[in-house]
Image: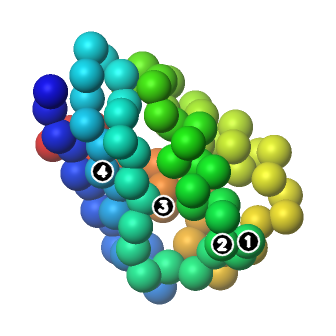
Amino acid sequence: MKHHVGEHKAKKGLIRIEFDERDGRAENVRITGDFFIHPEETVHELESRLEGHKLEELEGIIDEFFAMRLDVEMPYINVEDFKIALKKALEG
């Protein structure tokens, strides 16, 4: 099992994505940082959505997730910031 960690410093806030890779799939996905997002359970829902998926599917899932969650407020960070943190995690 391989452990991936990626961090991205957005305009205001750090986004950190980490997960374990088993058989090409993401497990134990954790998204942390010092960014503001509302509603608060959004991050937990995104983690759950990414769980168990193939690594090459993760970026698309992030796009899909936020496209469907129009109620989410994220001042100073955006979907791209999450995707950059993910890409850095995949590189590492």
Q: Amino acid at mark 2?
A: Glu
Q: Which mark is residue 81?
A: 3
Q: Give the label, 2 or 3, closer to the camera.
A: 2
- Assign a secondary structure to mark 2: loop
Q: Which mark is residue 58?
A: none
Of tags 4 and 3, which is closer to the observer? 4
**In the picture provided, is 24 more to the left or to the right than 55?**
left
**Amino acid type at image mark 3:** Asp
Residue at the spot of label 4: 18
Amino acid type indicated by mark 1: Pro
Q: Secondary structure at mark 3?
A: helix
Which class describes the residues within 10 Å of circle 1: few (<14), some (14-19), or many (20+)? few
Picture layout, residue 11 above or below residue 71: below
For residue 40, the mark is 2
Residue 39: which disc? 1
Q: Earlier in the sequence, mark 4 or mark 3?
A: 4
Q: Residue at x 47, y 85 (%)?
A: 12
Residue at left 73%, top 71%? 39
**Image depth: mark 3 or mark 1 in front:** 1
Q: Position of residue 90 (x, y in %)?
A: 27, 38
For residue 33, side relative to residue 38 (left or right):
left
